[in-house]
Amino acid sequence: MSAAAWVGRRHQELGVPCQDCFALERSEDARVCCAALADGAGSRTRSELGAACVTRCVSRLLCGEFDALWETEDLAGYLVRRCVQALALEEPPVYELASTLLFFAGHSDGRWIAGHLGDGVQIHVGDDGALSVFSPPENGAYQNETFFLTAPDAAEHLRLRRGRSEGPGSLLLMSDGMSESLYQYATGTPAPACRKVAQWLRDGDEEAVSQALEQNMKQVFSLRTGDDLSLAAVCWE
């Protein structure tokens, strides 16, 4: 697993902190790993705290309770409730902590659980380099509108999937700022550069890949958007 986030040009100009956040977690027995990513709502005052809170909460839950969650019937409702409970312990009102949420947790026996709420994109990269959209963005009536974890209907919009891996592959989780470079909205297809990111992770050291992602966000991807950038990548054998 590797990940990085970078503050967008608009926020740098305004002196606003990066509202994208990620968390990478492994269970104590190292049998489960989880990557989670959240994009804080730009219209809320402390959404960066909310994004950090929900990524930390969901990654720890999935690593610590994977077997139980695998069997949970209303998993979307359960995860939303636990995240909102965690948000309620933060200082600002929960309303000001709104964010999207994307995550993927994999078990060493091949089982996985994935979730996606809001915009942002999840891209699957096969062992042969084949690209496919694992989970597309969900916007509101307009492209700049989306759904947040703190909304009353959040559980209805949290798209949950469970399955078993059938071979090597990679999954890229990205915020809407990052997807402006790695996802072609006009055609609904992944950009070829997704293959390169997946190849970095398959061939390289996790920490080195995270550093490379951050450098590319700073030097390349930030020139294509004024939005915050974040990306988490997971690969499996």
Image (tube, grey):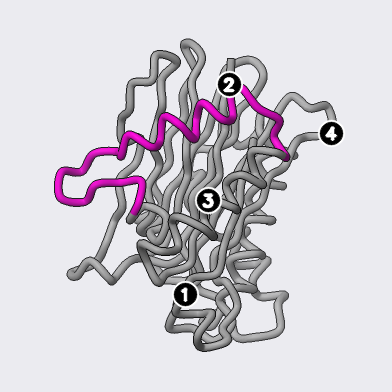
Q: Position of residue 81 (x, y in %)?
A: 57, 60
The numbered disc on residue 9 is: 1
Residue 105 is covered by the magenta coloring: no
The C terminus lies in which quarter of the figure? top right
104 sits left or right of 124 in the view: right
Mark 2 — residue? Answer: 236
Query: Mark 2 and mark 3: span between their CA atoms?
Result: 23 Å
- Depth check, mark 1 against mark 2: the one in front is 1
Residue 200 is covered by the magenta coloring: yes
- Depth check, mark 4 against mark 2: the one in front is 2
Three-letter code for the amino acid on which mark 1 is drawn: Arg
Q: Position of residue 211 (x, y in %)?
A: 66, 47
Mark 3: which secondary structure?
helix
Of callouts 3 and 4, which one flags the residue occurring earlier in the amino acid sequence? 4
Q: Residue furthest left?
A: 186
The N terminus lies in which quarter of the figure? top right
Query: Mark 1 and mark 4: span between their CA atoms?
Result: 38 Å
Of callouts 2 and 3, which one flags the residue occurring earlier in the amino acid sequence? 3
The numbered disc on residue 216 is: 3
Q: Residue furthest top?
A: 167
171 sits left or right of 84 in the view: left
The numbered disc on residue 28 is: 4
Q: Residue furthest front?
A: 219
- What residue span does the magenta drawing correspond to? 181-207
Label pair 1/4, CB-CB below 8 angstroms:
no
Of callouts 1 and 4, which one flags the residue occurring earlier in the amino acid sequence? 1
Of callouts 4 and 2, which one flags the residue occurring earlier in the amino acid sequence? 4
